Amino acid sequence: MLKKGMLILVLILVASAVAGTRYWVEPDKCSGCGDCLVVCPVNAIVIEDGTSHINPDVCIGCGLCQGVCTYDAIH
């Protein structure tokens, strides 16, 4: 049986895959802290030259990265 947190994550992933939402990083706002990289369930984020970059071919649009970004750099 799935725990409540895991069930919520599964629902988010399914809903975002259906919606087709993809995220991108606004480089001028990104601090390169890596918080988004840590929460990405599909490893779609890398940090290059001090800025996060989201691979749109890998991103499933779950929004976890946007939720943890304290710099409002992910849209």
Image (cartoon, grey):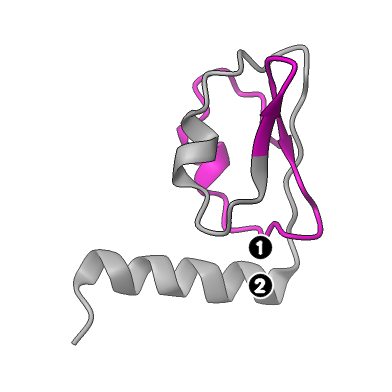
Label 2 crowd bin: few (<14), some (14–19), many (20+), radius 10 Å? some
x, y (%) of residue 26?
Answer: 77, 24
Q: Is residue 67 magenta?
A: yes
Residue of label 1: 60
In the displayed structure, does residue 41 sit left or right of residue 18?
A: left
Q: Which residue corresponds to the image point at 61% horizontal and 13% vertical from the top-left?
A: 31
Q: Could you tell me which secondary element the residue under label 1 belongs to?
A: loop
- Secondary structure mostly seen in magenta is loop
- Whether 65 is drawn above or below 7: the answer is above
In this rendering, the answer to whether 47 lies above or below 28 is below
Q: Are marks 2 and 1 in contact (CB under 8 Å)?
A: yes
Question: Tag 2's secondary structure?
Answer: helix
43 displayed left or right of 52: left
Residue drawn 52% across the image and 49% down it: 40
User: What amino acid type should be assigned to the residue bearing mark 2?
Assistant: Ala
- Say above or below: 14 vs 52: below
Magenta range is: 46-75
Spot occupied by residue 22 in the image (x, y as percentages of width and height): 75, 54
Residue ID for mark 2: 17
Horizontal arrangement in the rendering, residue 38 relative to residue 19 (left or right): left
Kindly identify the residue that appears in the image at 65 percent across and 58 percent down.
Answer: 61
